[in-house]
Amino acid sequence: MSSWVYRQCPLDWSTFEKLMHDMSFRIRLMQGYERIAYARYQSAIAFGCYLGPSSKELLTLRWNHLFNQIYKWRFEERYNVVIDKDLHKVATTNFDIVKPERKNELVLPHLFNSNKSVSAGQFNASLIKLFTEFLVNTPEPNFQTLRKTFARKIFEDMAYSDLAVEILSDQLGYSRTLTRTYLRKEGESNISIY
């Protein structure tokens, strides 16, 4: 089995909520480009943890995606996820801070070409910097950390059920076996649904 499945650990939901709160507080105190950059990354992190998109979906996220009431999953259209009111609040607040020229502008545009998104490497490096700055302790943070946070939250909210594994397997595009492995936290050898 691929080692990437084990390396990235999800954030506890309370850790994610604290990160969002702390970032919001810091953003209110900032000015200029730094404030805009933090607002953009907070929006992407929130989107990643609330909806669990793939890396490609996260990197090509546009502001109008955050304002739609329904986000369509790339892998399985029969499951629609209503955008959480907290995610909508983060998106609205940060949209007002960033003031993009168009609603379909990328949330994370490349510094020198606004029609192109940042690379996965740039995103992961920025995520490491932000997690370090805000004292979020997780090994090797990257976009998968956000996706796993989403998946683990759904899994816990659905009482670790087989139905949760089935739904997440469809939404994430993984086999059920890989989904069960993906849902493990560091140190867990098995999850209760085997």
Image: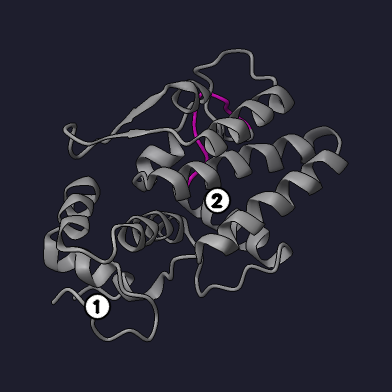
In-front residue for pair 122/136: 136
Left or right of 114: which side holds 93?
right
The residue that label 2 is drawn on is 122
Q: Distance between the residues labelled 1 and 2?
A: 33 Å
Residue 113 falls inside the magenta stretch: yes
Which residue is painted at 39% across and 80% down in the image? 186
Which amino acid type is shown beneath numbered disc 1? Ile
Q: Residue 166 location in percent, x, y?
A: 15, 55
For the rendered model, the colour scheme is one colour
Q: Which mark is nearer the camera, 1 or 2?
A: 1
Range drawn in magenta? 112-119
Nearer to the camera, 127 or 120: 127
The residue drawn where x is 39% and y is 43% is: 51
The label on residue 191 is: 1
Indicate the position of residue 6 as horizontal and vertical percent values: 33, 75
Query: Measuring 21% from the left and 69% from the top, which residue is drawn there?
Result: 180
Residue 130 percent location from the top left of the image: 66, 58
Quarter of the image for the C terminus: give it: bottom left
Residue 65, percent across and down?
Answer: 44, 25
